[in-house]
Amino acid sequence: MKKIAIFFATGFEEVEAIATVDILRRADMEALMVSVSGELLVKGARGVAVQTEKLISELDFTEIDMIVLPGGYPGYENLENCGELMTQLDLFHAQEKPIAAICGAPGILGRRNILAGRTACVFPGHEDKLVGAKVVTERAVRDGHLITGRAMGCTVDFALMIVAYFNGVDAADKIAASILR
């Protein structure tokens, strides 16, 4: 079973984080909610508090198959300010291990030169943050080991793309049908 770490920071976008966890779990993937905020209880951008399952300091990244970065403001900034997460993000990219980011979070990848020469999408108005990328307006896009999504309204497409990455398009289509997508 693939183990996907979804990172929660104060100010995360609730729908992007929780719906992604939900869809991955429907696909029988281990979607682990990880806090970078020093506490298991993390408050989202709209004030919804979520009890995560692990602190980043407790995580063994060698057991993780993918890093997922939700957006939300100031959530994506707080993710980027987490040195341990950024170190692991760079290592994942160097090893071409899968990384997914949605909304404002693809800007983190752009600023770290992870998107250079890649196709990516981001929240409207943040296109300049995707340094070196070919920017598209797709709801979600995959380029190699990288998946990016545009915004909260694109979360289902984003999460289904993660399912397809690991389990194939048929598996993603089955989940999509089960949620009437």
Image: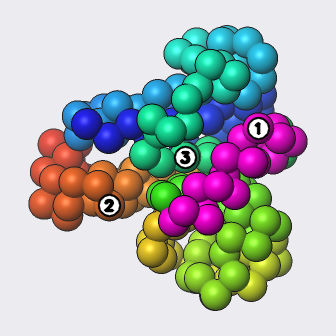
Name the residue: 55% across, 46% down.
68
Q: Amino acid at mark 1?
A: Glu
Tag 1 residue: 84
- Residue 23 image point, x, y percent: 33, 39
Name the residue: 20% across, 61% down.
168
Q: Which mark is on residue 68?
A: 3
Tag 2 residue: 165
Question: Does the image show residue 148?
Answer: yes
Label 1 near label 3: C-beta < 8 Å?
no
Horizontally, is 100 left or right of 76 in the view?
left
Q: Which mark is on residue 61?
A: none
Give whichever of discs 3 and 1 has the lower sequence position. 3
Among the 4 quarters of the image, the one containing residue 28 = top left
The front one of 17 and 167 is 167
Question: Does the image show residue 47?
Answer: no
The boundaries of the magenta stretch are 79-96
